[in-house]
Image: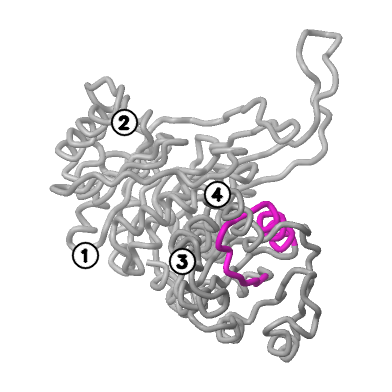
Amino acid sequence: MKKKFKEFLDSDHRPRLLVIGDLILDEYIWGAINRISPEAPVPILETKSENLALGGAANVANNLVALGCEVHLVGAIGKDEKGERLLSLIKGQGINTEGIFRFVHRPTTSKIRIVAHNQQVLRIDKEDNRPITEETESKFVQHINKILPEMDCIICSDYRKGVLTEKVFKAVIHRAKNSKKRVLVDPKSSDFTLYKGATLITPNQHEVERAVPIKIQDKIDLDRAAEYLLNLTHAEVLLITRGKNGMMLYQNKEEPVDIDTQAKEVFDVTGAGDTVVSVLGMALAVGFNYKDSAWLSNMAASIVVGKVGTAIVTLNEINEYLQEEMLRTSHTILKLEELKKIVSLAKSTGKTIVFTNGCFDIIHGGHIEFLQKAKAMGDLLVVGLNSDESVRELKGEGRPIKSERERANIISALKYVDYITIFDDDTPEEVIREVRPDILVKGDDYKMDEVVGREIVEGYGARVELIPIVHGLSTTGTVEKILENHKID
């Protein structure tokens, strides 16, 4: 999956997506609350700044543009000042607006959010939720029938503001089936019969609870609810977003897939559902399967909830997150070839690689303090560990006390150590040549000219550092003390 995403990132291919739904102007007023009004017991917002953002289906389109897609948007706005501002924002993002029609007798939908100290404290909605007129429906259907066959994927973003009527949605499904195109739906209605024929539907758990005659208290109930909705809508896939509990992916006749959340910090969930359906659409359009598309959308959502306000996620942000995820989830104990790939990836993201080596036969306080200081010099600490054969060559018969696997497992449990590789040679020179660390570290019981690999690292512009060690602590000394204390008279 990561390889396929990298190929897409490096290519010039721009998938074409059609987004149909409710267009919303998001307005933000930012400020601080430091006092209470003398007129009434309400807080006073001292305004610092204001900005506009694309909301609803327009935010889905905006996300897709950030993901490198060509986007055609179908929706409606009022013939008013807010409508002009919203249309200007949409055009400014390079989104095709030929499918945007103007209302005469209803306002542009807008949401004004009051944000104090990066926390939303109030939202003011201006909207008319009545269904669009038959005349506007006909305009939508005519435009959809014309352009849909040229698209790679269709997304219906339903915010229940009157655009996605039954007639419009049926026209989308009919045209999509004839053109063999997938239709993704981000639903807001509790009546899922409206979405019958969709390929994939992305409700959150609360929306599922409103749509089924089942009280959801555990995963078994959620599974039953998903089966009910799949049967009701005849959809191929149901992806249920569950906030801090991640996502559940349901495909007909396949086992459900539980996808854990990856969010580190949650500042604002505004627009997270838009990000999920956008990334799903992009991923499916470029050839990802449902499981990988869902995993990618979950990761993208974890990025966007770490931002404040209606936000988008970019291809570069996803790529950086994927690289970080690879570094986080990689095994600690690696073969040299595996280690080289991980180190190369780390260096491509600007990480500093620190390397040290040793036998680490019986771990003592001196080892731990040394490794802690070594880790503090860079981003990733790589330890070259002498194999059992190598230790015997260096220390003689009877050593090592613990096997290479035991020693590697103990070191990998230390939070300071990122990766370990085991080598058979007397010296780690081959490892150093292959890994090419930025910093080679040893204890200050060595002199600089005694450090194996110094000439190698200095030859390509890296450096050697000597770390003060705790004197009086050594594995050999520990072994001798144990033998002394347990000798037989």
- What's the mark number on residue 155? none
Q: Which residue is mark 4?
A: 486
Q: Which residue is most to the front?
A: 489
Residue 215, how many percent across, how many down? 27, 20
Residue 336, how many percent across, how many down? 48, 78
Badge 4 density bin: few <14, some 14–19, many ≥20, Cα 10 Å: few
* Residues drawn in magenta: 354-376
> Seen in the image, is 266 located left or right of residue 229?
right
Q: Which residue is mark 2?
A: 208
Mark 3 vs mark 1: which is more N-terminal?
1
Residue 46, how many percent across, how many down? 83, 29
Mark 4 vs mark 1: which is more N-terminal?
1
- Closest to the observer: 214 or 137? 214
Residue drawn at 59 percent across, 68 percent down = 383
One can see residue 65 in this view = no
Given the image, on which type of amino acid does mark 3 rest? Glu
- Which of the two marks, 3 or 4, is nearer to us in this view? 4
Q: Secondary structure at mark 4?
A: loop
Residue drawn at 31 percent across, 31 percent down = 208
Given the image, on which type of amino acid does mark 1 rest? Ser
The reply to whether callout 3 and callout 2 are in contact (CB within 8 Å) is no
